[in-house]
Structures are given as structure tokens and as C-alpha cells.
């Protein structure tokens, strides 16, 4: 495992998708714990520099794009080209916390039946379970060694007032969805997981798990290329146009003609990518720290025996877990403006949250810090659909920070849809709504964060 030494951590992100023209070209992986521990980056097909034709061209070399490409090629015999602006896994797929549980979007479970009805809510929950199965299948198919931590996931009440909401969700999961979640009290958490000053109860999702997210992305990259997919780095899409029976998708050096286009850029989907996607997403920064390893005394004082992934019950939640080398990963919301992402206060905010939860860990220091864009749609659920005026331009976007399993799964659903034999749940298979007063999205974000601070206490 790495020793960060005195290297100053940096979380620099390259652009704000609401303002920038694109995420860059050929940028390396971020300076993260995941990049430092993933091993050599797998081979890809280099820069796209020669015109060609294909059945499908995919914009974005992360979970959604690579999974879609793999399933298209393996299951439908399609000729697929993936165009990645930087390095495969550079965006959300290589920066997230790696925590996975049944979860789609940010609509509270207790509101599902009101929004989608009894049958629709049950169908959507079943889709979440299928998404977990897709991740496990990909890991098995590719023999992907991604540091699987397979002990369930906890949603922990960070204050007594949050216990009632967990109990309500537990009842709903059992009665409406037939899902065997467990409601734990503070004593259960201390006995089996850790001692924390912010753990008054927990809802345990028994089939939740955690992974090394970049190793997972790299494994799916190998699967896709092994199935015959061409994956090109340093090949940002600069635009596309209708071209007879299909589309011509342009990069700085060459173009590819294809019948179908898939937009798989999630939090890095810029307003300038295509007019039909303008004002449809709100990219929000999330920051992550990884500490130095805990000492034996620190580990003993907190009794931090579990590696289960954890999220608390704040609206602007913190998520964390003990990594296999006894470091602590902690993530949470970042600044509004990407230009301030490296200000010390954002690292201290996460470290302070860790100290509040675990006072004996007050001496921990940060070895790694980075940031990335989470994609929020206006209605707080992902969308797997096509552009209305372009029925062969597909997208899967809006994972709301819970996208590891949905991205990989929805990529496979898109592959089947393009291949002609898909079913996509009605709650997901529809156009993305526009943000009202879209020019003021950042202002609305500030108001939203202020409200979250008030609600979280």
C-alpha cells in the first residue's frame, strides 16, 4: 500500500460543466488513493485519429459507457467505439467512494409509492436489486480483483431524531418490497461494527458492499476490449451531426459514423455537449479524503472492526468506511465553485466530520484528497432514454451520487434496448426535465445547501 509521505494532496478538478467547453484532453487520473493503489492502467486503443464507421459510438469511458459497450459487443455482436476525453475511468467511475447498496437517485424511500404507485415502486426497487446482480456478474465474468468488502452497508442515524425515519424505511422495505433489511440499535452497532459518537441506530442493507472503484472500472475496460470494443483515450467529442441514416461524431483528429450514439458522461455532461441536453443536469462537487492508517491503539479505542460501507442520515450526508489497509475513507459535499476545491477548509470539513464521529481518531491526518462531479437531475432520479428529436441518440444520466451499480446496470439495459430486446422501468425510461430558471442553478444550489445545513442541525 502507498505511503503518501509529505506529498501535498490535491483535489483539482479541471472544469465546471456548466461553464467549460469540455473536461480536457488526455488528462491523467486524479491524484487519489484509488489511482495510487489500482496498479498499472490497462491498455486501451490510444487516441482516435482515423475516420471509421461503427454500429454504436459511446461518449464517455466510465462505468455506463464501458458496460454498455461490453454488453453490446458480447450479447448483440455490435461494432462499438468508445470515445473518452481523458483516460478510461477518469471521471465519476474512478473518483467515487465505492459504496454500493440498493439505491437509485435521491428520492426518499418513504416517498416512492406516492410518486410511482405501489407497482411502480416495487418494480423500481427490484431494478435496484438487479443492478447489484449486474455488478457481481461483471466482477465474476472478468475475474475482477476490486478489493470487494462484502459485509452489508449501514445507513446510520447521526442523531436521535433520525431514528424514526430509519424505522419507517425499515417497515417499508419489509412490507412493500419484501426486502430483509435489519434495524440495529446503538448497542448492535458498537458490538459488531464500531464505537461512534454519531451512531444512534442503523438500517443495515445485507446485500450492500464496497469496492475499489477504479479497479472495477479497469476490470470492465478489460472486459469490453476483450469482447472486441475499441476504447480510445484523449479523444474528446467536439460535436456531432446527423449524417444520412446515422450520425457523424467528431473528435479533434477524426470522426466516426454510426447509427447510434450513447451519451455516458453523467456528472461531466457539459451544457455545451448538445443543445438537447442543455439545462438538464446540475453537477455538484463531492470531496473525498483518505487518512493515514490507524494505529493499533486508534483502532482499539474505536473498536473499528468492520469494513462495511457507511452513510449517515444527513441531507448533505457523509459516507465512510475502513479500507483494507486500516485507512479511513470519508466523503461528503464539496464547494459550489471548483476553483476553491483545494482550499484547506474542505479537507478540514471532512476531517472534522471524522473526528466528531470518532473522537479517538482526532490525530489522523490526510494522505489523499480529491474531488469529482456528482450529477443531479431536477427530479432526483436517473434517466435512461433517448433524445426526443434523435431517437437513436441514447443517454443514461443523473445518478445523484449513488451510481456505481446503476451506471453499470443501466449501461447493460441501454445495450439491450439498442439491440432490440430491452425493458426499461417507466420511472427511468423518460426524457430528463429541464431545470426551471436554469441560468440560476448555482444560486439554487447555494439555497439548497443552506437548507440542508439547517435541517441537519
Image (cartoon, rainbow, N blue to C red):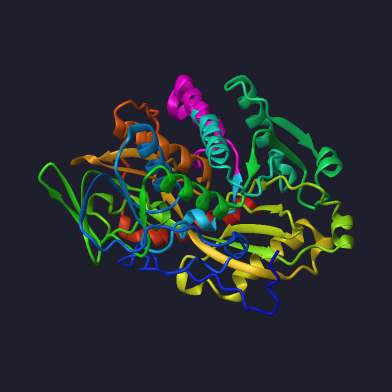
In-image side of 350 versus 420 (left or right)? right
In the image, residue 158 lies at what x, y percent?
71, 48
The residue nearer to you, when weighing 231 against 147, is 231
* Quadrant assignment for the C terminus: bottom right
Task: State the residue at coordinates (50%, 30%).
Answer: 112
Quarter of image, res 39: bottom right
Task: State the residue at coordinates (33%, 59%).
Answer: 270
In the image, residue 3 lies at what x, y percent?
71, 71
Can residue 398 be seen from the camera position used here?
A: no
- As for residue 79 lying within the magenta part, the answer is no
Position of residue 147 relative to residue 110, above or below, is below
Quarter of image, res 35: bottom right
* Quadrant assignment for the N terminus: bottom right
Q: Which residues are magenta?
A: 100-126
State the residue lying farthest toward the left.
Answer: 244
In-image side of 77 versus 126 (left or right)? left
Task: State the residue at coordinates (83%, 38%).
Answer: 188
- The kind of secondary structure the magenta stretch mainly shows is helix
Position of residue 344 relative to residue 223, above or below, is below
Amino acid at each position: 500500500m502507498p505511503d503518501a509521505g509529505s506529498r501535498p494532496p490535491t483535489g483539482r478538478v479541471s472544469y465546471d460543466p456548466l461553464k467549460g467547453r469540455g473536461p480536457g484532453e488526455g488528462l491523467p487520473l486524479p491524484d487519489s488513493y484509488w489511482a495510487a493503489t489500482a496498479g498499472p492502467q490497462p491498455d486501451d486503443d490510444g487516441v482516435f485519429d482515423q475516420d471509421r464507421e461503427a454500429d454504436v459510438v459511446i461518449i464517455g469511458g466510465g462505468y455506463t459507457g464501458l458496460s454498455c459497450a461490453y454488453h453490446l459487443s458480447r450479447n448483440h455482436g455490435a461494432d462499438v467505439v468508445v470515445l473518452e476525453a481523458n483516460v478510461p475511468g477518469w471521471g465519476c467511475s474512478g473518483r467515487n467512494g465505492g459504496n454500493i447498496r440498493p439505491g437509485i437517485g435521491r428520492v426518499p424511500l418513504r416517498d416512492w409509492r406516492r410518486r410511482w404507485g405501489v407497482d411502480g415502486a416495487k418494480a423500481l426497487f427490484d431494478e435496484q436489486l438487479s443492478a447489484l446482480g449486474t455488478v457481481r456478474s461483471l466482477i465474476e465474468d472478468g475475474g475482477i480483483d476490486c478489493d470487494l468488502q462484502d459485509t452489508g452497508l449501514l445507513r446510520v442515524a447521526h442523531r436521535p431524531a433520525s431514528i424514526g425515519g430509519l424505522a419507517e424505511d425499515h417497515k417499508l422495505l419489509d412490507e412493500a418490497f419484501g426486502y430483509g433489511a435489519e434495524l440495529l440499535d446503538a448497542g448492535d452497532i458498537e458490538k459488531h461494527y464500531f464505537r461512534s459518537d454519531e451512531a444512534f441506530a442503523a438500517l443495515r442493507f445485507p446485500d450492500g458492499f464496497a469496492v475499489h472503484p477504479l479497479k472495477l472500472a479497469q476490470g470492465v475496460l478489460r472486459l469490453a476490449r476483450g469482447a472486441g470494443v475499441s476504447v480510445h483515450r484523449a479523444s474528446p467529442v467536439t460535436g456531432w451531426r446527423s449524417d444520412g441514416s446515422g450520425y457523424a461524431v467528431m473528435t479533434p483528429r477524426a470522426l466516426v459514423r454510426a447509427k447510434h450514439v450513447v451519451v455516458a458522461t453523467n456528472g461531466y455532461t457539459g451544457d455545451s455537449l448538445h443543445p438537447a441536453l442543455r439545462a438538464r443536469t446540475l453537477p455538484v462537487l463531492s470531496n473525498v479524503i483518505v487518512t493515514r492508517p490507524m494505529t493499533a491503539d486508534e483502532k482499539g479505542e474505536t473498536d473499528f472492526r468492520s469494513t462495511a460501507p457507511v452513510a449517515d442520515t444527513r441531507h448533505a450526508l457523509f459516507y465512510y468506511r475502513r479500507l483494507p489497509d486500516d485507512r479511513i475513507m470519508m466523503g461528503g459535499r464539496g464547494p459550489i465553485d471548483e476553483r476553491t476545491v483545494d482550499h484547506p477548509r474542505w479537507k478540514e470539513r471532512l476531517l472534522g466530520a471524522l473526528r466528531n464521529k470518532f473522537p479517538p481518531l482526532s490525530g489522523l491526518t490526510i494522505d489523499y484528497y480529491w474531488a469529482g462531479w456528482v450529477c443531479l437531475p431536477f427530479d432526483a432520479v436517473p434517466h435512461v432514454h433517448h433524445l426526443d428529436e434523435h431517437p437513436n441518440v441514447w443517454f443514461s444520466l443523473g445518478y445523484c451520487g449513488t451510481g456505481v451499480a446503476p451506471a453499470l446496470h443501466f449501461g447493460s439495459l441501454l445495450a439491450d434496448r439498442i439491440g432490440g430486446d430491452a425493458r426499461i422501468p417507466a420511472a427511468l425510461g423518460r426524457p430528463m426535465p429541464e431545470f426551471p430558471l436554469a441560468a440560476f442553478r448555482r444560486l439554487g444550489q447555494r439555497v439548497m445547501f443552506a437548507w440542508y445545513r439547517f435541517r441537519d442541525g
